[in-house]
Image (spheres, rainbow, N blue to C red):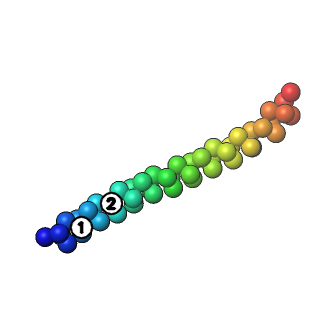
Amino acid sequence: MAAVCLASFAILAGGLVTLYGLGWYKNRKQNRKLARKVEEEEPLAEQLT
């Protein structure tokens, strides 16, 4: 009985870690894209001034 409880807890914890990890990875990719856009726009702003 205790083994079943521990196994279900491990499955639940693994699922939460997976969801959190995927969210972190997507946010990281999005933040990199935003940083690249800002870097590309800065030289254009300097040329216009």
Answer with left or right where residue 6 lies relative to residue 42: left
Q: Residue at x 84, y 33 (%)?
A: 46
Mark 2 = which residue? 13
* Outermost residue, top side: 49
Label 1 SS = helix
Closer to the chain start, of discs 1 and 2, is 1
Q: Residue 4 or 11: which is nearer the viewer?
A: 4
Residue 41 against residue 48 in the figure, above or below = below
Q: Residue at x 86, y 34 (%)?
A: 47
Residue 34: image x %, image y %?
Answer: 63, 43
User: On the image, which quarter does residue 22 sit in?
Assistant: bottom left
Answer with left or right where residue 39 lies relative to residue 4: right
Q: Residue at x 62, y 48 (%)?
A: 33
Callout 2, which amino acid? Ala
Number of marks in picture: 2
Residue 45 against residue 19 in the figure, above or below = above
Near mark 2 (Cα within 10 A), the count class, few <14, some 14-19 or many ≥20, is few
Residue 14 against residue 31 in the figure, above or below = below
* Outermost residue, front side: 2
Mark 1 = which residue? 6
